[in-house]
Every structure is written in structure tokens, then in C-alpha cells.
Amino acid sequence: MQEKWIALSNTTIGQLMATINTSIIIVALPAIFTGIHLNPLDAASFPYLLWLIMSYMIVLSVLLVSIGKLSDIFGRVRIFNLGFLIFTIGSILLYIAPGTGYTIAMELIIFRIVQAVGGAFIMANTFAIITDNFSAKERGFAISINSVAAVSGVSIGIVLGGILATIYWRDIFLVSIPVGIFGTAWSYLKLKDVRERAARHIDIAGNLLFAVGLIVLLLGVTYGITPYKNDPMGWTNPLVISALTGGTTMLALFPFVEKKVKNPMFDMHLFKSRNFSISIFTAFVSAMSMMGLMYMLTLIFQGIWLPIHGYNYSVTPLWAGIYMLPLPLSMGIFGVISSKLSNRFDPRWLTTAGLFISAFALLALVTLTYDFSYLFLSIIITIFGVGYGIFNVPNLTVAMSSVPANERGATSGILNTMRNAGYASSIGAFFSILILGLSLSYPDAITTALTGVNASGLASYFSSIPPTEILFSTFLGLNTVKDVITTLPGSAVSNISTSTMNTITGHIWFPETIAPAFMRSMHDVFYTGFGITFISGIISLFRKPSNADDDINNCKKQH
């Protein structure tokens, strides 16, 4: 087998495995918490719930650029191979983690971090290894295959996690072990470096400043959506404000530090390339919009549409993943198509057209009612996927082709960093909009609905539920009403008739009660997604023609 196909097969397996694990745990969390004997809606359990979801993405975001630069110095294939090994070890530790309760919950978080370190080693090098091994004409196609794996992995993880969680919760970690063992052996035996290493020293100051700054900033974003005292969110929490301010300040100082050191972690002169800078920015925004859409669709399906249409809460995570399949399928198909088109058309027009298509698909979603036609929704999310697929591969190809060979590892790292930072930011931004909308209208809506079924005595309990708890309960496919009632004192439910109790704990009552407020907030999210994606499309118009990006060489000369 030719070296380039070995490189493509290795990196695609690694990319698929790493991205599947960004989402596989989400739908399996109810099974995990049941298996380790924790209530996911208990206040003390919420930080563990949040960190099981977020730790993997945060670690990826923080490490990718640093690992990319280390790969330029010590060898991309060597670091990539080590990543497979670390990822496999993390998966084994997750599968065999002992204990119950908060002890094993902390172990799972720690081992998820180990797994994420391995994932960072893999993802930081995929685009660079492909770029090293494929010619300019073949590069777009090869990147498209890898990108299909990356995009599809998120949706595959949701469906796979839903299936495996119904069997045994530890199986969601078991599935990565044989793939990891095969990938480790295959890469160590067959994959070879084809580029000389860059003879440089490690930029300790730059690495620390970037890593600490991004960690602190993402911690602030993460805890910004958690309740603080009497507020539905934590944006007024002094610790959150300090984290956002401190993280932003450190990241703002990062470029100035990098310009002063002899061997910077990332050559800031590369940002003088208009095409490179625009590619990095639009990669962040598109990832934020895409992952935000997937989170919102998950909430719509699990919290409203599926229960109303008779699906049991316990299977809504699995069916949400299945119903969302048109999105990754269209992204994958048109990702491959766009790789062929980018050889014939200027990538500037493809990336711009893709962003505009995705933007107007998001705008069309504001017409959704809570009892929507699935055919209509599937058409809209397919159109979004077409736009994302058309945009993604040419954007990555332009970014990777616009930097010198000895900077490809760091460039691959920063592209994946921006994508994962976009994933994490989508939670903070879009969930904040939802929580704000629900906090304004949910208390009155639930009070009116309970009064209407002669259960006004429960209104004080249900109206005080934080919107964050409602969203995460929905996200986990839980029956919120039933779970809350089990925690109430007997005196609170003693006067509630059996028929009323059956009504409010059924599939339809609670979803229909929160649906109007929920969808109004969801429309605000889609307007926001449209706005940032449309602006990115306008910015993408300012790229230079693909054969005119000589400013990298000029930047290197100036440097």
C-alpha cells in the first residue's frame, strides 16, 4: 500500500475514534449515573455531570496547538502514534474504573482527561500528516475523507452511545478499546514520517500562557450556565467574571509574548496571511454553529417532539440521534463533493457559498413550531449539512496549504483547537440564550398548567426548578416531572388525584407546557446562529484567490 493511503487510513481511524468520544457519553449519562448510583439532577452531582460532558472538549481545545508544535519538533508520526496508545489506555481505565458514587465519578472524569490527551495527540496531527503525504491536487479529497470522519463521528457517537447504554453503561468505553489497539499497532508498524523535523526549542512561556488562558476562559464559559444564588445562570458570579477576564487577558497577551521569543509556539506572522486568518476565524464560527445546532436539535427532539409523539423518555436520546442523521450524512456527502469542486473552482466562492447556505438554513428554522413536520425539519437540516460540507473541506485545505511545511503541525493543532473551542463555546452561548428565555416565562407557564389540572399545590415546587436543570434533564432523556415528584414530601402530593398524577407524569403534559416558551427561546438561538454564520460568510468573501496567497512567504521573510 502506498504511504499516502496508509497515512489517510491511520488518520481517519484516529479522527473518527477521537470525535466519536466527544459525544458518545452524552446520551449514555443516565445509564452511567444509574450504574454508579448517582442522581444526575441532584445539586451535588451536577458538577460531575457537567465535567463528564465538558472535560474531554476542554482538554482537546487546550492541548491541540501545543501538541501540534511539539509534533513539528519531535515528529508528527511519533506523536500521533503515542496518541493512539494513550487514548487506548484511557479507554481501558474508563472501562475498569472501580467503586461507586462520587469516587467513581471523579475517576471517570480523570480517565476522560487521559483519553482526551490521547485524542489531542491524534487530532493535532491528522491534517498535517495528510498534507505531508498528498499532493496539492489530491489534498482536498484526502482532507474531505478525514473531515467526513470528524463530522460523522459526533453523530455516530450519539447513536452508538444510545445503543450501547441500553446494554451496559461500561460498553460505551469498551467499544474504543479494540479500535485503539488496532490503530496503535497499525500506526506503529506502517505509518512513517515523510518530513524533516523542525530544529527548535520548546516555547515554555507561550505554551503555559496559552494553555492556562484557554483553560480559565473555558471554565468561565462552562460555569456561566450554572445557577448562582438566586440567578438562573452564573454570569454574575465573581469567580466566573474573574475567569472570563483573566482568561481573555492571558490570551490577549499571548501574541505579544510570541513575537518576543526566539522559537514561538505558533508563528504569529502567519496571521498576516489573509486567507489563513479568515480560515481560522470561520472554522471557529462554523463549528460553533454546527455543534450548537446539534445540541438544539437534541433538546427539541428529546424534550418536546419525541415525547409528544409517544416515545418513552428512556429511548429519546437514541431516537434523537437517529432522526438527526440527515445532518451528518449531508455534511459527509457534500464534503467529498466539495473536495472535487475545489480543484475546479476558487475555494473562496465555495467557502462563502457554504456559509451562506448554512446561515439561511438556520434562519428557516425560526419557523418551527413544537409539533413540526419531520419532513420539513429533515429538509432544513439537510440544507444546513450541504452548506457545512461545501464550506469545511475547502476552508481546511486553504489553511493547510497557506503555511510552510514546518508549521503544518501547529496549524493542524490550531484548526482543531478552534473547532473544539467552537464546540465548547456553543454550549455557553446557546444554552445561555435558552436559559434566559425559560427563566422569564417558565414559572408562569408551569403555574398556570398545574392550576389547570387541579395540582396548584405543586406550583411552588415546580416553578422554582432552575432552567438549567430542565435543560439538562431534557438533554439526558429524563422524565423531569416524575423525578421531581419522587423528591417531594408526602404532604405535597397527598391531595393530588391518581388521574392528575398520571397526566402530569405522562409523555405529553410537561413537553406541551414548556413548549411555547422553549420554542421562543430556541428561535432566538437560531437567529443568533444565522447572524454569526452570515457575518462569517461576508468575511469569507475577502479571501484572496487561491493562487495569490504569497503573503506567507513575505511574512516569513519579514520574520
Image: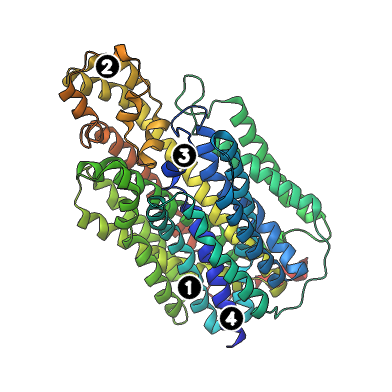
Q: Residue furthest bottom?
A: 1
What is the CA distance from the residue labelled 4 to the residue labelled 1?
16 Å
Between residue 123 and residue 425, name the one nearer to us. 123
Q: SS of the residue at dot 3?
A: helix
What is the CA distance from the residue labelled 3 to the residue labelled 2?
26 Å
Identify the residue at horizontal 26%, vertical 41% (top origin). Answer: 304
What is the CA distance from the residue labelled 2 to the residue labelled 1?
57 Å
Tell me: residue 441, above or below residue 508. above
Question: Where is mark 1, residue-wise?
Answer: 144
What is the CA distance from the residue labelled 2 to the residue labelled 4?
64 Å
What is the CA distance from the residue labelled 3 to the residue labelled 1?
37 Å
Identify the residue at horizontal 46%, vertical 28% (top origin). Answer: 42
Tell me: residue 192, above or below residue 504. below
Of callouts 2 and 4, which one flags the residue occurring earlier in the amino acid sequence?
A: 4
Of callouts 4 and 1, which one flags the residue occurring earlier in the amino acid sequence?
A: 4
Of callouts 2 and 1, which one flags the residue occurring earlier in the amino acid sequence?
A: 1
Q: SS of the residue at dot 4?
A: helix
Would you say 85 lies left or right of 32 here? right
Way the structure is coloured: rainbow
Question: Where is mark 2, residue-wise?
Answer: 493
Q: Which mark lies nearer to you, 2 or 4? A: 2
What is the CA distance from the residue labelled 3 to the residue labelled 4?
40 Å
Answer with the quarter of the image where residue 557 lies: bottom right
Three-letter amino acid code of the residue under disc 2? Val
Residue 342 position within the rendered picture, expressed as x and y whole percent measured from the top left: 46, 77
Between residue 273 and residue 336, name the one nearer to us. 336
Q: Which mark lies nearer to you, 3 or 1? A: 3
Question: Where is mark 4, residue-wise?
Answer: 6
